[in-house]
Structures are given as C-alpha cells and as structure tokens.
Image (cartoon, coloured by chain):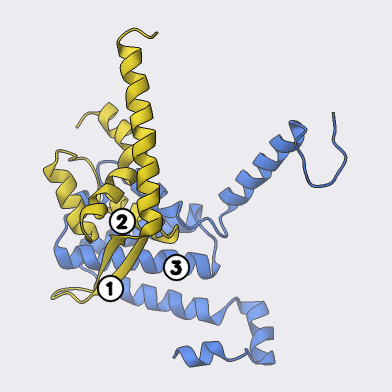
Amino acid sequence: MTTESNEQKSRYRQYLELVTGSLEDKRRYRQYKARIRRLPENYRTAAEALERYLMMLGPADGAGAMAMYEDLADLLEQSAADGTPIRDLFGEDPVEFVEAFMANYPAGQWRSRERNRFTSAIERAAGEDTGGKDRAV
Amino acid sequence: MGKQATEMLKGTLEGIVLAILADRPAYGYEITAWLREQGFSDIAEGTIYALLVRIEQRGLVDVEKVPSEKGPPRKVYSLNTQGREYLEEFWRTWSFLAERLEQLRKGGE
C-alpha cells in the first residue's frame, strides 16, 4: 500500500491531481469517514459536529488536514472503546476543546495566514521590517 | 473547580502533564484519571489528548503504541531528554511566578 506512494507519480497522475487535488489525501479522507461510520451513534454524532466545525474554521485540505482527521478518529475510537462519556470527553465547554485540538494543525488554516500577515504588518508599522526593504521611519 | 481555577490551570496544564510523565510513562486516559483524583475535575479528556498531540509534535515525549484488549492500540507517552529539559524550565518559571506573587500578597517591597 505504501510502496506505491513512494514511487514517483506518473505524469498522468500529476496532471490529474492538479485538477482533483491529491488522491492520497482523498484516500485518507475516505478511510477516516469509514472509521467514523463504525463508531457508536453518540460518538458519531459528535464526530459529525466536530467535522463541520473543523471544515468551516480549520485547515482547508491537504496532508495537514488529513493528519488532523486521523488524530480525531484515534481519539474517538479510543474513547468509545473505554466507554468515556461524551461530556467527559469534550468538557463543559466543547469549543475550548476543539480550539485546543485545531491549534495543533496550523498548516493550511486561513486563520494562520491572516495571523502571519497581521504580525508582519505590525513589524513593518513598527519599523522592524528586516526583509531588506527600505525602512519607513 | 471554579472558573478562576480553570483559567489559571490552562497556563500550567502542559507542565503538570510533563511532570506526571516524568514519574512514569502513561496513556491519555491514565493522565486524565490521575488529574481527576487530584481534584482537577473540569479537565476534558479531549483537551488532554490535544495537549499530548502538541507535546508529541514538539518532540518532548516519545510515543509507543501498545496493543489493547479493546479498541485500537494505545499510545503510551514517556518524557524524553528534551521533555525533561523543558520541564526543568517550567519549574524555574513556576518558582519565579510563585515567589513574585507571594511578594505581591505580602504587600510588595
């Protein structure tokens, strides 16, 4: 299974992925969805709600997002196996949990891009721009 | 646990978890259970998991996957050298903070 991904991608596949996005990511996403479908109903309901939140506010796509979904599936499968109550898993404020979780996957998040942009803008405004450009004093 | 305690705990939770792992390797569920026993009742297991993912990404712990009777293999976390250095720094910071706050309570100098 992994030997194929180590081989150089065919030219055809390179072109195809330009259009469709990474096939490897799609395969990982399908595997994640299958793992979620096998969860007990209340964990599945929580997973779907989490997925919506992460889709709207988290990393858009790509390998970073897939790592995030796989970590989420690990957590839910383990909790279901341990019989951890939903409330013990997510706490009184589930937003706090999801934000702490999401912060681990900054790649591909529009929030990260905007944070970097903002930080650089303040650096320039403070006259600390070290990018080789003229300093605006 | 009151709201204030929960807020204060947030900043120190990472150090607390590293300190637990300094004693012995543990998996997420064990860490949460220990925290609950110690009276940190409001901590969600998911939050501990997110923290463990973060300290793993930062290379502070080593992770071993151990097969379990039920469910997927468990990830057992143990503190590595880098984690121990980080924990020492945490305790230095903690001592500094505690000392300064105590001074403040006594009326400053």
Q: Is residue B58 above or below residue A137?
A: below
Q: What residue do we see at 51% from left, 65% from top?
A: A64
In front: A53, or A117? Answer: A117
* Amino acid of disc 1: Lys
Q: What chain is tagged by disc 2?
A: B
Mark closer to the observer (3, 1): 1
Q: Are marks 1 and 2 in contact (CB under 8 Å)?
A: no
10 Å neighbourhood of mark 1: few (<14), some, or many (≥20)? Answer: few
Q: What residue do we see at 19% from left, 32% from top?
A: B1
Visible residue check, residue B60 = no
Q: What chain is tagged by disc 1?
A: B
Q: What residue do we see at 16% from left, 55% from top?
A: A85
In front: A49, or B71? Answer: B71
Residue that badge 2 annotates = B49
**Quadrant in which the C terminus of chain A appears:** top right
Residue that badge 1 annotates = B65
Q: Position of residue B96 (x, y in %)?
A: 38, 28
Q: Position of residue A41 (x, y in %)?
A: 22, 65
Residue A67, labelled with which disc?
3
- Determine whether the residue tagged by mark 3 lies in a helix, strand or loop: helix
Q: How far apart, in angstroms, are the residues tagged by discs 2 and 3?
A: 14 Å
Q: Which chain is yellow?
A: B
* Amino acid of disc 2: Tyr
User: What colour has chain A?
Assistant: blue
Q: How far apart, in angstroms, are the residues tagged by discs 3 and 1?
A: 17 Å
Q: Quadrant of residue B59?
A: bottom left
Q: Position of residue B10 (x, y in %)?
A: 34, 38
10 Å neighbourhood of mark 3: few (<14), some, or many (≥20)? Answer: some
- Determine whether the residue tagged by mark 2 lies in a helix, strand or loop: helix
In front: B45, or B76? Answer: B76
The mark nearer the N terminus, 1 or 2, is 2
